[in-house]
Image (tube, coloured by chain):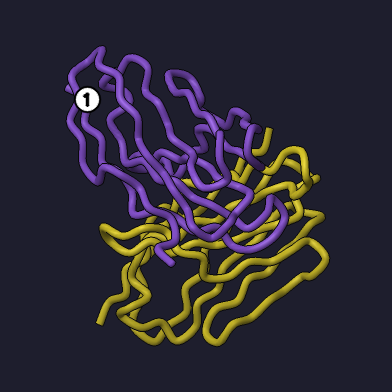
Amino acid sequence: GENVEQHPSTLSVQEGDSAVIKCTYSDSASNYFPWYKQELGKRPQLIIDIRSNVGEKKDQRIAVTLNKTAKHFSLHITETQPEDSAVYFCAASVINSSASKIIFGSGTRLSIRP
Amino acid sequence: NAGVTQTPKFQVLKTGQSMTLQCAQDMNHEYMSWYRQDPGMGLRLIHYSVGAGITDQGEVPNGYNVSRSTTEDFPLRLLSAAPSQTSVYFCASRRTPGQGGMFFGQGTRLTVV
């Protein structure tokens, strides 16, 4: 089955700098890659996702890149702000009608230093 | 529109007890799932359902049962609680198996003593 590895487990960056979180997946059939943000004591919330037919997607300060050949995908946050402090999870999935497991990485705790 | 609602929010069980975690969604989502969250291990899939009457196992199904008799409800049953099942449990739903982001409930913090 699918296995998703996420690095680093913790990341501390200066406010205003960029943060990059990287994930790898094992199932070459995976075609959907969402990212979730979980603030302390809250539920995970979807922040951005990408499908395998595109290599990059941006939404304001957040971007995700996908390298299908290497089975890598990354989350990029630019101009980091204190409210970006949270745990971020990547995930991978094969989307079809008969089996649709979304498998998560182990998470990255991002801290923004003032 | 309440989204995904889980009950209870907190629960303490004794080893060997059984209980059911409730999950309901009012968005007419076909896809529902249960995850457990443990420190350093992310979110691990327990069971999922792609529609009423259809369930399947995830990564860590042992010790848990599910059923999906209606589109709205997807309860998770712990058959005989063990300390290893101490965790935060999240229910999540999605419009269809192939569409839309996943919406999570607020979580249930379960402690087994």
Quadrant where the C terminus of chain A sits is bottom left
Depth order, front residue of A109/B99: B99
As displayed, is residue B96 above or below residue A112? above
Q: Colour of chain B?
A: purple
What residue is shown with label 1?
Answer: B112
Quadrant where the N terminus of chain A sits is top right
Q: Is residue B56 left or right of residue A16?
A: right
As displayed, is residue A30 above or below residue A41? above
Q: Is residue B10 left or right of residue B24?
A: left
At a point 39% along the width and 87% down the height, the residue shown is A16
At a point 54% along the width and 78% down the height, the residue shown is A62
Give the mark count: 1
Q: Kindly identify which chain the residue marked by label 1 belongs to.
A: B
Q: Is residue A22 left or right of residue A67?
A: left
Q: Position of residue A58 (x, y in %)?
A: 64, 81
At a point 51% along the width and 25% down the height, the residue shown is B61
Depth order, front residue of B113/A1: B113
Q: Position of residue B3 (x, y in %)?
A: 44, 61
Kind of residue at disc 1: Val
Answer with the quarter of the image where residue B84 lies. top left
Q: Colour of chain A?
A: yellow
Q: Position of residue A36 (x, y in %)?
A: 49, 62
Q: Position of residue B15 (x, y in %)?
A: 22, 15
As displayed, is residue B1 above or below residue A114? above
Q: Is residue B5 left or right of residue A90?
A: left
Crowd tier of the residue under label 1, counting other residues whose Cα lies within 10 Å: few below 14, some 14–19, many 20 or above: some
- SS at mark 1 in the image: strand
